[in-house]
Image (cartoon, rainbow, N blue to C red):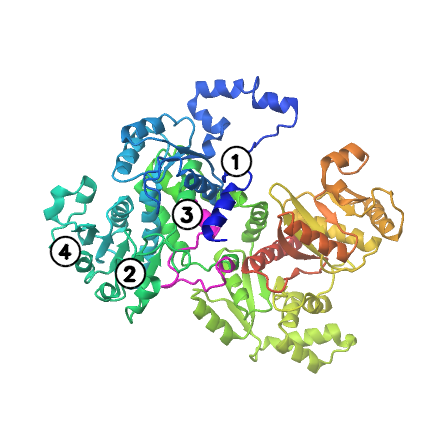
């Protein structure tokens, strides 16, 4: 099937379209319905009648944007009318929800008269917390937006104007820096003089471009002072006192080309006529003013190129802007989206492009290198960090410029935004905040691996830990330079003659001499195997915690810390625990990585230590011993072990509820637990699931992760005498950072 057929099938599939309404409150009982509608609904109605601002408190208005269009200028399709434009508006709603968790009603108005549009949209102010105008032709769009911003007390934003301006403006900030040009000196040429071009030109001036250096070219030619009387008032703003000419004349000697016109209008000769290291934003869709390869091949110097296409570097995509701009505006109940807010968004995007890119984002774009430079001047749309950078920047700018009706604290706001993207981020924020209060030294045993180096950079930047990279210092230095990371981490070079190595070898020998290791072998292990070096550092107190396993099989990575550090005084064994975060629930799954066939004593110990781990995340544990039996319904050796483990825990006075054996659905479904097994120790569904053996644990957590849609954090090792965590081979940088934060909090708890 071709793209058109695939798209038609996608939209036609039941239910048709892309948006639906869902309830956000319980509607299971008669009482629920009486609260949702009559008679209970009268109470919030009276409150809002007394104080209209209470609509933001008692209704969905605080998180509701209206996407409004008359279909008169649909991208690539033109004036197709309101109803034909509805799939686009629904798509806009999908992007709002997907990227910023904002609800949308799409409103298609069959109106051509600007005054009628203004009246209709203004009358809908009680419904929406903000209005996104979409696909309305110029010049009427300018008039409509301006009038609505004056009349309405909620933010009104015409994305076709300002979206491209903000995203390309962010790209411009970075491009001029890479090209070593000054923003106030660059000559900028615009091909096209519609809504996007005029708004972008205005915005570039707000960023610092000299308005006298902006040349705009429409279908007739350069907009000169001599043409001022023949163009509309919006084009007239950019009429320059220069000779008449065409686009080729305008581009001669220019530093920046901004294309918002039609495909193929620029040739290689025009590109060659531009100034050194030219910046070309060819943003006509679906095909740019000049192809990416053609522009690059036209010159021998650096051509910094951006387009509107996803199959080339530096895509100028409006989804980098509008969801996050409205998110920040809604959250401070802004009355407007002003110039200060738009500039803040562009600068936040430009700054983010200079940061290390998460592995998940790199994978989403085919593992292509993403590093600040000519091929990467703006973030990718699927980068989740855009939400955490742009929305706070918008909110702060709104407060500082006086259009916010509520105040927020930035750090707390960032944490609320993280929670919108998933429970795992919310839970990890708890641990990271704890870690920041007292960062500890964490030895990274595979310190010359690129991911470990990038993780070390983040740990320092975020104040989570003091990483110590164990590895080849030459490789580490070269990787830092290649990645463009500005930091100077502590490194212990495993190939050097570090004077501490003899002390570490002596200590390893003392610990293992009755386990078959000679002094010579101990020295070789310290210098050859960073896992032994890191383990001895932690055991001797030169490091507070250790991470390993990124490039090793789990058992081989675990062996050195077990031999050197060993288990805690109250532990006979270690266990691997995953935290599985669902949308509204978190569960801890144990043991998923270490113990093949634990007996009752082992299950009890695993439960106890896993409960301690849950409390590091501020979660009060409720443990369930999982089985295929419910409280004695099946009698055999396996079910008896789980049952006996519960008895052992109760005898020793465990300080959190534990029960079992029980089936998995009994453990997690409230109706089953309370309705059928009301005698259970658990008042609420379990959040600590203890599997009967390693096979069940490994299968169970992977099914929960893959089919249940859970985010998995771990495995986190419990039962060690000092904080050690073993990564899974190939883990992402964020996984390393997360486990390092857990290790720091573990070390803090042990200090206390």
Q: What range of the chain is rendered magenta? A: 362-391
Where does the image place residue 81, in percent across and percent down from the top left?
Answer: 35, 36
Callout 1: helix, strand or loop?
A: loop
Number of the label disc, if any, that sits on residue 438: none
Residue 263 sits in quarter: bottom left
Q: Nearer the viewer, mark 1 or mark 2?
A: 1
Residue 266 sits in quarter: bottom left
Callout 4: helix, strand or loop?
A: loop
Q: In this figure, which residue is indicated by the disc labeled 1?
A: 20
Can you say whether 464 is above or below 272 in the image? above
Callout 1 touching callout 2 (CB < 8 Å) = no
Whether residue 124 can be seen here: yes
The disc, 1 or 2, on the residue closer to the chain's N-terminal end is 1
Q: In this figure, which residue is indicated by the disc labeled 2?
A: 279
Q: Nearer the viewer, mark 4 or mark 2?
A: 4
Where does the image place residue 40, in percent across and percent down from the top left?
Answer: 57, 19
Whether residue 591 can be seen here: no
Callout 3: helix, strand or loop?
A: helix
Q: In this figure, which residue is indicated by the disc labeled 4?
A: 245
The disc, 1 or 3, on the residue closer to the chain's N-terminal end is 1
Q: Name the residue rendered at 28%, 28% in the picture.
A: 115
* Structural distance between the alpha carbons of marks 1 and 2: 42 Å
Where does the image place residue 183, in percent across and percent down from the top left?
Answer: 25, 56
* Structural distance between the alpha carbons of marks 4 and 2: 21 Å
Q: In this figure, which residue is indicated by the disc labeled 3?
A: 319
Q: Residues within 10 Å of mark 2 (few under 14, many from 20)?
A: many
């Amino acid at each position: 099937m071709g793209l058109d057929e695939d798209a038609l099938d996608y939209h036609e599939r039941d239910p048709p379209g892309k948006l639906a309404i869902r309830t956000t409150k319980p509607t299971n009982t008669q009482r629920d319905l009486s609260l949702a509608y009559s008679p209970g609904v009268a109470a919030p109605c009276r409150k809002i009648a007394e104080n209209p601002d209470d609509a933001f408190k008692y209704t969905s208005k605080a998180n509701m944007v209206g996407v409004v269009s008359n279909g008169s200028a649909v991208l690539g399709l033109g004036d197709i009318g309101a109803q034909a434009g509805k799939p686009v508006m629904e798509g806009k709603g999908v992007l709002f929800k997907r990227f910023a968790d904002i609800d949308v009603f799409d409103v298609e108005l069959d109106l051509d008269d600007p005054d009628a549009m203004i009246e209709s949209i203004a009358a809908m102010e009680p419904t929406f917390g903000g209005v996104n105008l979409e696909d309305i032709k110029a010049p009427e769009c300018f008039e409509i937006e301006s009038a609505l911003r004056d009349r309405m007390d909620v933010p009104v934003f015409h994305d076709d104007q300002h979206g491209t301006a903000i995203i390309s403006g962010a790209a411009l900030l970075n491009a001029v820096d890479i090209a070593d040009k000054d923003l106030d000196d660059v000559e900028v040429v615009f091909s096209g003089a519609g809504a996007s071009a005029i708004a972008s030109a205005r915005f570039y001036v707000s960023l610092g471009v000299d308005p006298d250096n902006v040349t705009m070219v429409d279908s007739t030619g350069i907009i000169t002072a001599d043409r001022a009387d023949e163009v509309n008032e919006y084009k007239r703003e950019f009429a320059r006192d220069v000779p008449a000419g065409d686009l080729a004349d305008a581009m001669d000697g220019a530093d920046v080309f901004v294309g918002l016109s039609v495909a193929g209008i620029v040739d290689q000769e025009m590109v060659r006529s531009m100034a050194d290291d030219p910046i070309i934003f060819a943003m006509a869709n679906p095909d740019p003013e000049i192809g990416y390869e053609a522009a690059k091949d036209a010159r021998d110097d650096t051509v910094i190129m951006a387009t509107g296409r996803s199959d080339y570097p530096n895509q100028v995509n409006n989804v980098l802007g509008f969801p996050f701009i409205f998110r920040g505006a809604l959250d401070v109940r802004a009355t407007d989206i002003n110039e200060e807010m738009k500039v803040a968004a562009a600068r936040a995007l430009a700054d983010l492009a200079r940061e290390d890119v998460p592995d998940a984002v790199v994978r989403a774009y085919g593992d292509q290198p993403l590093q600040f430079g000519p091929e990467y001047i703006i973030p990718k749309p699927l980068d989740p960090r855009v939400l955490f950078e742009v929305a706070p920047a918008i909110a702060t700018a709104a407060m500082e410029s006086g259009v916010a009706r509520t105040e927020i604290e930035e750090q707390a706001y960032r944490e609320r935004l993280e929670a919108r993207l998933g429970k795992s981020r919310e839970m990890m924020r708890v641990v990271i905040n704890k870690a920041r209060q007292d960062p500890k030294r964490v030895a990274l045993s595979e310190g010359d691996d690129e991911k470990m180096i990038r993780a070390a950079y983040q740990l320092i930047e975020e104040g989570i830990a003091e990483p110590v990279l164990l590895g080849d210092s030459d490789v580490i230095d070269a990787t830092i330079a290649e990645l463009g990371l500005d930091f100077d981490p502590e490194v212990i070079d495993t190939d050097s003659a570090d004077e501490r190595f003899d002390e570490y070898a002596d200590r390893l020998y003392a610990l293992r001499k009755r386990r078959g290791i000679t002094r010579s072998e101990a020295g070789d292990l310290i210098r050859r195997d960073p896992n032994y070096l890191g383990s001895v550092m932690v055991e001797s107190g030169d490091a507070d915690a250790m991470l390993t396993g990124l490039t090793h099989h789990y058992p081989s990575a675990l062996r050195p810390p077990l031999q050197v550090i060993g288990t805690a005084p109250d532990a006979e064994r270690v266990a691997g625990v995953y935290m599985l975060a669902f949308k509204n629930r978190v569960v801890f799954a144990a043991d998923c990585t270490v113990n093949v066939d634990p007996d009752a004593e082992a299950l009890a110990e695993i439960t106890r230590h896993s409960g301690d781990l849950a409390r590091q995340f501020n979660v009060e544990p409720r443990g369930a011993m999982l089985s295929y039996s419910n409280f004695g319904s099946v009698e055999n050796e396996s079910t008896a072990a789980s049952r006996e483990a519960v008895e052992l825990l109760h005898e020793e006075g465990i300080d959190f509820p534990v029960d079992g054996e029980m089936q998995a659905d009994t453990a997690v479904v409230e109706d089953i637990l309370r309705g059928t097994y009301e005698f259970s120790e658990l008042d609420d569904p379990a959040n600590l699931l203890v599997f009967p053996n390693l096979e069940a644990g490994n299968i169970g957590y992977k099914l929960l992760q893959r089919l249940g849609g859970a985010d998995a954090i771990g495995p986190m090792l419990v039962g060690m005498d000092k904080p050690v965590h073993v990564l899974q081979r190939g883990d992402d940088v964020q996984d390393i950072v997360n486990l390092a934060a857990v290790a720091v909090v573990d070390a803090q708890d042990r200090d206390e």
